[in-house]
Image: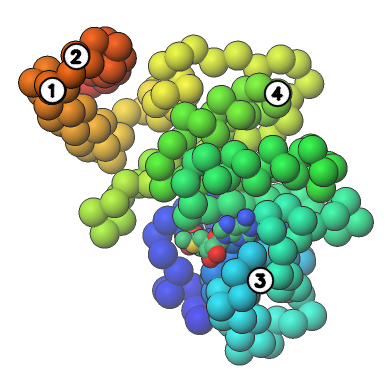
Amino acid sequence: MNHQELSKRLEMVGRFVPENSRLADIGSDHAYLPVFLALKQQISYGIAGEVVLGPFQSAEKQVAKNGLQGMIDVRLADGLAAISPADKIDVITICGMGGSLIRSILEAGKNNQQLTLQERLILQANIGEALLREWLQANQYQIIAEEILEENHKIYEIIVAELSETAVSYTKEELYFGPYLLKTKNAAFIKKWQRELHQRQQVLAQLKVAKTPQTEKITEIQAEISMIEIVLN
Ligand code: SAM
């Protein structure tokens, strides 16, 4: 692979990895991200963690093809079981999964002491980003950067967080839309939330004509709609 083969999404994730980092990429189908960063000499060491055999083997092949066996270890493991404090990992990337799966990987990693809590977390969920922000807040991680971008008609959010010395508190809107994304409201952000608004309006219309009363669900979705409308206006 070369730098042109990496998706715009993963390339953006890579921009948040500091020079000389020791990186663990969890759910590293093909190991594209660690290989790209190792070839650029942006990381000094990488772990590609994969729980499924096929993607694990693809990751091994990609690392071997690029002659990076001495620099990237490919490990077959569930979530953060791929790393231990002895690896001295300072950046963890978890990308391309649902928010609830990423959250459960982080929670298990914390409970099993696989996280030292000193690592920078770079997270890209395909859905359910608010669940991640809630986990970060509950675990005293400060969001230090966010990005939103469109690639192949899909819109992706990237969240970068580090442990804070003090309690972290976000508003309901910051958890839902992202504290940094809310400030910039770029074109991808507007597009995402216009789509989300449209979807919710359709769901609301269906709920209103449902045979059984859906009062609670209607109230919930109306609240979301008005929150999105306020942000878009
Ligand atoms: N991270 C890459 C990206 O963003 O392009 C690959 C994303 S791919 C859609 C998700 C990968 O995560 C799959 O290869 C899947 O096997 C892996 N995965 C899912 N759950 C996992 C877990 N608990 N531990 C490690 N890998 C996991």
Left or right: 142 in relation to 5: right
Check whether the beta carbons of the residues at disc 2 and disc 1 lie within 8 A of each other.
Answer: yes
Q: Quadrant of residue 222?
A: top left
Left or right: 129 in relation to 35: left
Find residue 185 and report its horizontal and vertical position in percent.
Answer: 32, 28
Residue 229 seen in render = no
Q: Which residue is mark 3?
A: 38
Q: Which residue is mark 2?
A: 213
Q: Which residue is mark 4?
A: 140
Upstream in sequence: badge 2 or badge 3? 3
How far apart are labels 1 and 3 at the CA level? Answer: 54 Å
- Type of the residue with mark 1: Ala
Q: Which residue is mark 1?
A: 210
Residue 198 seen in render = yes
> Which quadrant contains ligand 1?
bottom right
Upstream in sequence: badge 3 or badge 4? 3
The residue that appears at 26% across and 37% down in the rendered structure is: 192
Q: Quadrant of residue 128?
A: top left
In the image, the residue with mark 3 has its CB under 8 Å from the nearest atom of ligand 1: no
